[in-house]
Structure formats: C-alpha cells, structure tokens
Amino acid sequence: MASTESTRTQSSDVLFHREYVFRSSNGVLAILVLALFGILFLWAAIQGANINLGKIGRFVSVGFAVAGVILIGLGAQAVVSFVIDKRIVVSISGDGIRRGQGFTPWSDIAVFYGTRYTNGISLGFSPRGKRIYIEKSLSTTPLLTDKEYKELANTLHGRLVHERSDVQIELFPREPIGD
C-alpha cells in the first residue's frame, strides 16, 4: 500500500520536471577537480610527514591526509555515477519538491530561489524551522534559461500565494556568492 505522501504527490500536477545528468561536462569537471585536490592534499600530507613540524604539524598532516582520502572517495563516486549514467530527477509540484528519492513539502520550505551562473540558472531552496541548515541545490542538466526560470517562479508564486503565503518565491535569480 502506498504512503499518503507518495499518493498525494503522484496525484498533484507537476509544474517542473528535469534531470541532473552525471555523464556531462559538469560530471567530468567534478571528477577532475575532486581527483586533483585529493591528490594535492595527500601530497601535502606526505610532505608534511617528512618534515619535523612538531605535534601541530603532524595534526595538520593527518588532517590533509583525511581530507585527501575523502576527496578521492568523492571523485571515485563521481566516476561511478558517470560510468553508469546516473541521473537524479528534480520535480516540482503543488505539494512540494522531489529530488531523487527525497521529498520536501512546501510546509518545510522557507524560500525557493534560482542562482544565475554563466551557463544558466540553478534552482534551490532554504528549509524552514531549522537552527542550522544547508540550502538545498536542485541542479539540472541543462540549467534553466532566464525565460524558463521566470515562468516557473511566476507559476509557483501564483499557485502558492494563496495556499502557502509563508513560502517566499524569489521571482528574479540571485547572483552567486563571491561574484
């Protein structure tokens, strides 16, 4: 028997549906960056171990080694995702947002936004009611155009303004932090 959440989501109209594809230029770039930094961190750890830097130096060397192993592990995961042509579905409906197997209802979302990059607009949202939270990225392949984002944001705003007035829909994309 299907859960109430999955039944409700399936019956709701889908306002946006697109995939993130790992077998893309972004996937290759992720592999290269993770591998390069992983190797660089391991090299720094080995060099630090060969120099007498005292207790703090050994602690820093271990930190670099752990970071290098984690980065190489993430790079290996990116390689596997690339080889098996992994895809993550991003779907937005009147009930909430689905990314892969995860589902977030609008009641758990404070802000829906887009971030403008040189190659398009990436979607994202901020969760509601958490002291410490990580903003959720909803990258797709390809990213949205200005027109697609404006249409989606306006549709969501029109749809949710009466049902979920506590959800802020940003009608214009943000500029990335650091630019």
Image: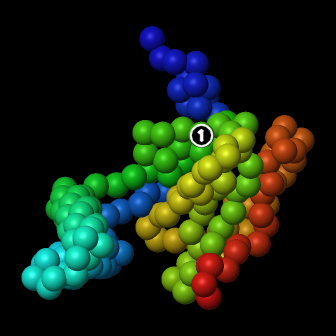
Look at 23% across and 76% down and name the residue there.
54
Q: Residue at x 25, y 71 (%)?
A: 55
Q: Quadrant of residue 104?
A: top right
Crowd band around label 1 with a 10 angstrom C-alpha radius: few (<14), some (14–19), many (20+): some
Q: Position of residue 65 (x, y in %)?
A: 20, 69
Q: Quadrant of the C terminus?
A: bottom right
Which quadrant is the N terminus positioned in? top left
Quadrant of residue 69 within the rendered picture: bottom left
Up-down relation of residue 83 to residue 50 (above or below): above
Q: Nearer the viewer, residue 132 or 84?
A: 132
Q: Position of residue 70 (x, y in %)?
A: 25, 62
Is 24 displayed left or right of 88 in the figure? left
- Along the line of sight, the residue nearer the viewer: 61 or 115: 61
Which residue in the rendered view is the most extreme toward the front?
54
Describe residue 17's horizontal placement relative to residue 179 as left or right. left
Residue 50 in sight in this render: yes
Which residue type carries mark 1?
Thr
Q: Position of residue 119 (x, y in %)?
A: 51, 83
Residue ID at (44%, 67%):
141
Q: Is residue 19 above or below residue 4?
A: below
Q: Is residue 12 left or right of residue 142?
A: right
Q: Position of residue 115 (x, y in %)?
A: 63, 72
Question: Could one spot residue 93 in this view of the protein?
Answer: no
Q: Is residue 136 left or right of residue 31?
A: right
Q: How is the image coloured?
A: rainbow
User: With respect to residue 1, does 68 lie above or below?
Assistant: below
Tally of numbered tags: 1
The residue that appears at 73% across and 37% down in the rendered structure is 107
Q: Which residue is mark 1?
A: 104
Element assignment for label 1:
strand
